[in-house]
Image (spheres, grey):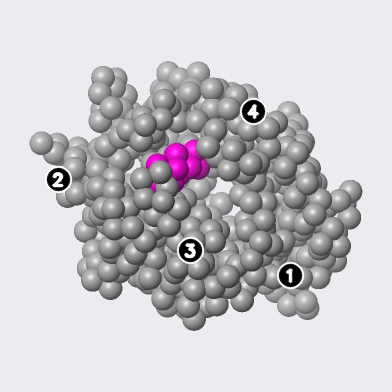
Amino acid sequence: MTTAYEEEAESFLSALEEEYFQNGAGLKQTFELSSIYEQYAHLFTRDRVEVQLAKRATKADRYLAQFAGFQYIGNSARAITEEIANGEMQATLEWDGGSVPYRRALTMLPNEPDRGRRRNLCRRTLEVTRRHNPTRAERFRQRHREVQALGFTDSRDFCEQLLGIDLHQLALQMSDLLARTQDAYRRKLAAALEESRIPAETAEVCDVRHIMLGRPFDDLFPEDRLLLLLERTLACLGIDLASQTNLRLDTAKRPLKLPRAFCCTVRVPSDVRLVIMPQGGREDYNALFHETGHAQHFAHTDESVSFAFRRLGDTSVTEGYAFLLNLLVNTQVWHEQVAETDPGPAYLSFCRFYQLYYLRRYAAKLIYEIELHEAGDPGAGFDRRYSQVLGDALELAVPQEDYLADVDDQFQSACYLRGWMLEAQLRRQLESKFGAAWLKHAGAGEMLRGLWRQGQRYDADELARQLGCQHLDPEVLISDLIG
């Protein structure tokens, strides 16, 4: 039976998602959270949250405690969050004799082909980032104080208990992943830099982000086939996108619209929105297919699933489904059987480098974030520590200015890493049951839709065991990348 608290919690999340949609889709120029939190303030009083935190005997109760605790901390810092978001939306920088919005400059940066201009633009965006860092630091301290006031040691302890994830164990797994993939990554990085005529000793993150756009392969990903190939891919899984009345696809081009695709779950499963501004190119396809994985998961969730498992839960699970669809565009099978193209060995090698880079980046990010949250204060040289930890993993110059802008709330990096592991184990099971061309097998679509209907009733560890694995681990992932 759904409680009054759960009904109001769902209404609150719907209001938040609507605000994210309006802002991200370019329909609003400001980001306004305060009025929503004020309307639902009774859900997040200290007494109410402490009651929810005390009731964690079952998994559903823990998810409700996670919701209450995370939103309470978010509410405590909402004014600073809005100040940062609105400051970034309003910030500009000088470029090519004119004024360019900061957000637009961030999207222009990896697309700039001239290395000198790219490095110059990077310096200018980092100056804006640096100016906002004192406010980000205050937000970090504010959240840390509130976490301790709730009785937790620090934000790592807070998130670990409410997420149900052993973050230190995951960090050990990631340290092992970094060590075992280092040689393969180093070879691919050197080859990519040499091909782009970038000296390895002066290579920066902005250089590799440009490489990661995969411009030499743009012909494989034309803008005018993006939605067609998405529809074809879903049709292979037995899904008719056009007939999904509960899934709204927003493809309009608006000046303030975020260029990268995103998914908003206004109501699960009755009002799911997939937002895209088609541009073409591999990154555009990647983003849309990733967000489609989220959208299909939530659009297929059974309405009878309780609020705790329909709207809350282990986000590693939905990330796993998102990566499953996302990584299809990296495969020979998808290109041959859906896109009807031949990607060639150079493209497949590039995809392996791409995944290695981002896996190593998030592995290092998790290690850094654990240190940062356990310290409780972003001072004392954490800008240098950020640059060192990520720089060692990526073997690149990593800008210190991003040491707070690159930190997600609630260890989302951990959920991404677990999602990658789940994707690899799920994909291996699909290949075992239905062959390398599992996408074209009706049974694969039935299996996925069956998993999606459960919402997030099972966490990533439980799903891994259901797939026949002893536990969630990176072994399949590592063997795929270095094999």
Query: Is disc 1 surrounded by few (<14), some (14 to 19) or many (20+) residues within 10 Å?
Result: some
Distance from Cα at disc 1 to Cα at disc 3: 29 Å
Residue 174 is at least partly visible in this image:
yes
The residue indicated by pointer 4 is 176
Distance from Cα at disc 1 to Cα at disc 4: 35 Å
Instruction: Pinpoint residue 204: horizontal percent, then vertical percent.
Output: 79, 52
Residue situated in front as seen by the camera: 318 or 308: 318
Between marks 3 and 4 in the image, the one whose residue lies nearer the viewer: 3
Amino acid beneath label 3? Trp
Amino acid beneath label 2? Ser
Residue situated in front as seen by the camera: 296 or 5: 296
Region of the chain picked out in magenta, as a range: 420-430
Quarter holding the C terminus? top right
Residue 105 is at least partly visible in this image:
no
Q: Are marks 1 and 4 in contact (CB under 8 Å)?
A: no
Count of numbered labels shown in the rendering: 4
Q: Mark 1: which secondary structure? A: loop
Q: Mark 4: which secondary structure? A: helix
Q: Mark 2: which secondary structure? A: loop
Q: Mark 3: which secondary structure? A: helix
The residue indicated by pointer 1 is 112
Q: Say if 459 sits above or below 284 in the image.
A: above
- As drawn, the residue found furthest toward the bottom would be 224
Q: Are marks 4 and 2 in contact (CB under 8 Å)?
A: no
- As drawn, the residue found furthest toward the left would be 1
Between discs 2 and 3, the one toward the N terminus: 2
